[in-house]
Every structure is written in structure tokens, then in C-alpha cells.
Image (tube, grey):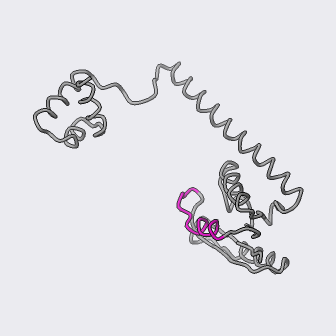
Amino acid sequence: MSRIIGYCRVSTEEQNLDMQEQAIKSYAELKGLELVMYVEKVSSRKNERTELVHAMKAATKGDLFVVYKLDRLARSTKELYGLTEQLKEKNVDFVSINDAFDTSTPTGKAMFGMLAVFAEFERDIIQQRTKAGLEAARKRGRIGGRPAIEERVKKHVRTLFESGESANDIANEYGIGRATVYKIINEAKD
């Protein structure tokens, strides 16, 4: 039996979920389907959206995953596409009430295809901006990555390590990572 998996989210404790919840309840009544609701008050910037994780896990073949608006589910086209793709793989249709987005209809399926195109476009734009930013930095004389460790510092690191100092203590003293200490030690062996 198909169900509605409803997901509502607001960013802060002070905000109210009533409008979203009522819209999803009305949609479930209109469709005559059981409603399982997941609600949370957390910013979409947070990676830990526990109720969203629970809602995604709860959705099974034949269910409808329903939100009030697309921005309640995801912050970017890429994230939205990723989540809706997960639902599609589970044979769960996706509905955004306010945006008239419904993947159970031919129009909704076409919109989903366009969403994939926009997600790829967004990813390409981000890559282009990153490349342009790195190139501009290089032209200004900046090189990416961490600065090279001077040879005299490497000698001190090796000397301290050979005298019995721990890699942690050496790393803390020189402001480098423990893995870098081991890398310097292994360079000397090669």
C-alpha cells in the first residue's frame, strides 16, 4: 500500500511548521493515503538533518515523498538532484506541493530530467569558478597548497625523532601534522 512520506523543515526553533504540515496533511487526505510525517527545526546548512535521513530510509517502493517547497529539502540543485535520484532508485515518486513538481506525472518526469541538466550545469560552473580563481591566484604569485618545509627544519625533525621524541610532540613544536613528520623521516630513508 502506498503512503505519503512527508518532510517539513524550518531553520530555527522560532519558526513555525504549521503551514507546511497542514499542506502535506491536506495533500495526503486528497490522495486518500496514509501519512507518515517527519519534521525538524534545523538549518539546511547543517549536514546532520536526522529527520531527513529517517524520512529517506522510511520511503519504500510505491510511496510518495512530499515536501511543501523544494527549498525545504535542499539548498542547491545538485543536492536536490542527489536526493530525488535516491528516491527514484527506490521507485519512490517525489512531490513538491508549492512548486507543482510531481515525478509521478509525465511533466514531472520531464522536470526531473531538466533538474539533472541543471545539477550538471551547476557542477560545471563551480569547477570553472574554482579553476579561474586558482589561475588568478597564480597570476598574483600565489601558489596553492601548504608552504614547503625548509631543509633545516627537516634536519631538526629527523634529529629530534632519532633522539626519541614522539612524532606528536615534534608535530606540535613545528606546527605540522604527525603524518608530515613521518613523511620527513621516510624521505631520509629513501
In the rendered picture of this protein, how many numbered marks are placed on residues?
0
Q: Is residue 37 above or below residue 61?
A: below
Location of the N terminus (image quadrant): bottom right
Residue 131 counted in the magenta span: no
| Observer-nearest of 104 and 80 | 104
Residue under the point 54% across and 58% down: 46
Q: Is residue 51 magenta?
A: yes
Instruction: Specify the quadrant that holds the C terminus.
Output: top left
In-front residue for pair 103/140: 103
Above-or-below relation of 137 to 117: above
Percent x, y of residue 110: 85, 51
- The answer to which quarter of the image holds residue 19 is bottom right
Q: Position of residue 117 (x, y in %)?
A: 77, 43
9 and 15: which is toward the camera? 9
Left or right: residue 182 versus residue 87 is left
Residue 122 quadrant: top right
Q: Quadrant of residue 13?
A: bottom right
Main SS class of the magenta portion in the image: helix
User: Compared with residue 170, is residue 58 higher up or lower down, i.e. above or below?
Assistant: below
**In this picture, which residue range is highlighted in magenta?**
45-58
Q: Residue at x 62, y 70 (%)?
A: 15
| Identity of the residue drawn at 24% across and 35% down | 174
State the image coordinates of residue 45 (x, y, percent, origin top left): 57, 56
**Residue 54 image position (x, y, % from top left):** 59, 69
Does 92 sit left or right of 140 as displayed? right
The front one of 39 and 164 is: 164
Q: Is residue 150 left or right of residue 102?
A: left
Name which residue lies at 75% across and 46% down: 116
